[in-house]
């Protein structure tokens, strides 16, 4: 790194830039040399935009049959109609409520279980095994049993989503708690922290990075599970909208639903990332 | 601090033994440190220095051993239950070789970690001011230099007004210049607050520079107990300083003089 900057420095000076400029110019502009490089505003939208462009081109040239996938403008038009008659909003809201409720409950449950398992051996013995077993069983496979137990209504849907969210929250928070540096535990003992203070000042903040990893996965999982349970006898929600469209072969509505899922998934993930970045301001990592 | 006459010694051990896997690391250590006394503990690596310090700090739960052990505020700080220490004066404070600041807590919050009372923050600020970091209270530990981090760790110990300060090679990871300044700082702070100090180090100069008394530990036993009767501040050039130094080096089994002569 030093060699590199000296090289550039000499080069710049010889070209005739004044010295202070040269010194500034000699510094690598991308931040850390071995980091992923500089952050360009809007760069993250590049991939999705290219994809959209390909879709537009394929539809416009007729390469893409509208029966396979409607053209972007048809989708936009349909979305407009759905919004105008209020069907899109009401169904989106129903889906959001469903996923949101289950997410909140699932995060709470996963967090509590992780704390129980992460902070005591007895808790670990009681909690960790069942969750590992639960993890091995795909949540979707629980649907038949859930229907028999809870019916085909809202309760079953929320429980299935909750069960999917819980696992990544639990696993990552638990790993975060167990990964807390022994030295900090020692410190906590020497300054005489109580159990509560230890949890509040050391264990929870130390496990926060893990929790956020879990939360991001959990948000994605909630959306995933939502799409599945909404195929089961729903009377509202994006999934319901799409199931109906399938019956009538309306691919444009299906695409509107997919875009809806996509947008909300993205928004959810972005929100979590914003909160994460604020909460973990003390971290200096490659991504920061 | 308030050296009540009932407790003349801050630390007292008798026949202290500790061992790992059947091997004795401490082999019957009798140690007394008077209130307000600054004691440096020298020893080669593996001599049991850190084991002794950890025993005094109550950080050796699960380590086999026997013997009597008395430190301020009960048998060990690790075992202090709630309410054992009044807010403010607590028995024992530890400074580790790494500053051991919680990376997710700001500097001031690190200093007052676990401190009760409404005035905790103002006391924390005062402690930070004492170590010359009054303006960094909102910083994250990762934004500080190694020396600054260790000064925060000192502030974290001092704000507790300990009767006993245990320091495990606290300057070992610092560069030579920073270390010199930290020596001055530690000396000042200890003169002002007068805790009993046990400074574990492998730096003979550091020991002679700071301590009232230097102990040499070898294979789990104290083999030398030497008073350093020099006025502060001490100078390395002082012949008496050099005498102490040579004696201690000899006790550590380092033929410093002959080595030097051989080189020059």
Image: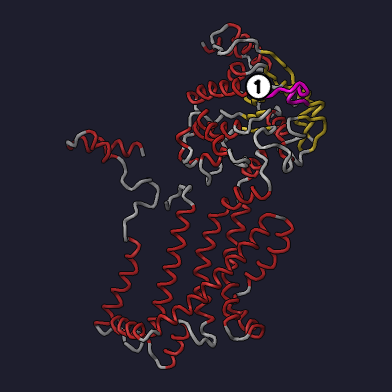
Residue lying furthest top: B239
Residue A277 shows up from this direction: yes
What residue span does the magenta drawing correspond to? B1-12
Tell me if B38 is positioned left or right of B262 in this view: right
At a point 71% along the width and 55% down the height, the residue shown is A120
Task: Report the front residue among A269 and A24.
Answer: A269
| Disc 1 target residue | B40
Tell me if B29 is positioned left or right of A280 in this view: right
Confirm whether the magenta stretch covers residue A225: no
Q: Residue A99: percent from the left, percent from the top?
A: 51, 74
At a point 28% along the width and 37% down the height, the residue shown is A7
- Quadrant containing the N terminus of chain B in the rendered view: top right
Q: Chain of mark 1?
A: B
**In the figure, residue B46 lies in which quadrant?**
top right
Q: Residue B8: percent from the left, percent from the top?
A: 75, 21
Task: Report the front residue among A183 and A202.
Answer: A202
Tell me if A107 is positioned left or right of A189 in this view: left
């Amino acid at each position: 790194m030093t060699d590199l900057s000296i090289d550039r420095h000499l080069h710049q000076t010889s070209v005739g830039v004044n010295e202070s400029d040269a010194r500034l110019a000699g510094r690598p502009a991308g931040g850390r040399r071995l980091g992923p490089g500089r952050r360009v505003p809007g760069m993250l939208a590049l991939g999705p935009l290219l994809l959209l462009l390909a879709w537009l081109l394929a539809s416009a040239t007729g390469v893409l049959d509208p029966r396979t996938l409607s053209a972007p403008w048809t989708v936009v038009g349909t979305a407009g109609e759905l919004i105008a008659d209020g069907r899109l909003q009401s169904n989106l809201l129903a889906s959001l409520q469903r996923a949101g409720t289950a997410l909140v409950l699932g995060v709470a449950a996963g967090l509590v279980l992780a704390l129980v398992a992460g902070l005591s051996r007895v808790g670990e013995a009681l909690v960790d095994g069942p969750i590992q077993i639960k993890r091995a069983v795909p949540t979707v496979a629980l649907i038949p049993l859930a229907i028999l137990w809870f019916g085909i209504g809202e309760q079953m849907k929320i429980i299935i989503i909750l069960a999917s969210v819980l696992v990544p929250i639990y696993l990552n928070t638990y790993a975060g708690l167990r990964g807390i540096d022994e030295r900090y535990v020692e410190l906590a003992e020497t300054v005489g922290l109580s159990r509560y203070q230890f949890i509040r000042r050391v264990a929870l903040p130390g496990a926060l990075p893990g929790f956020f990893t879990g939360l991001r996965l959990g948000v994605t999982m909630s959306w995933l599970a939502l799409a599945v349970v909404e195929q089961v006898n729903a009377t509202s929600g994006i999934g319901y909208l799409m199931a109906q469209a399938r019956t009538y072969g309306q691919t444009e509505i299906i695409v509107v639903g997919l875009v809806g899922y996509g947008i909300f998934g993205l928004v959810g993930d972005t929100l979590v990332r914003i909160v994460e970045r604020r909460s973990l301001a003390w971290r200096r990592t490659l991504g920061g | 601090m308030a050296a009540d006459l009932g407790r003349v010694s801050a630390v007292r051990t008798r026949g202290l033994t500790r061992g790992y896997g059947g091997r004795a690391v401490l082999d019957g250590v009798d140690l007394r440190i008077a209130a307000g006394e600054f004691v440096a503990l020298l020893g080669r690596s593996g001599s049991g220095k850190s084991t002794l310090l950890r025993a005094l700090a109550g950080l050796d739960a699960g380590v086999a051993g026997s013997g009597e052990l008395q430190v301020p505020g009960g048998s060990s700080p690790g075992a202090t239950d709630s309410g054992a220490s009044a807010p403010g004066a607590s028995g024992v404070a530890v400074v580790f070789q790494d500053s051991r600041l919680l990376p997710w807590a700001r500097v001031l919050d690190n200093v007052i970690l676990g401190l009760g009372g409404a005035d905790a923050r103002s006391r924390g600020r005062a402690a930070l001011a004492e170590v010359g970091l009054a303006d960094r209270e909102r910083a994250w530990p990762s934004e500080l230099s190694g020396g600054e981090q260790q000064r925060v760790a000192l502030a974290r110990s001092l704000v507790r007004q300990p009767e006993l300060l245990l320091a495990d090679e606290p300057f070992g990871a610092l560069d030579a210049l920073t270390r010199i300044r930290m020596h001055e700082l530690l000396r000042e702070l200890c003169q002002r607050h007068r805790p009993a100090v046990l400074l574990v180090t492998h730096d003979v100069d550091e020991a002679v520079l700071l301590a009232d008394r230097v102990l040499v530990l070898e294979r789990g036993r104290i083999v030398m107990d030497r008073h350093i009767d020099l006025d502060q501040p001490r100078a390395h050039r002082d012949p008496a300083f050099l005498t102490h130094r040579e004696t201690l080096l000899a006790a550590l089994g380092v033929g410093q003089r002959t080595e030097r002569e051989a080189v020059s």
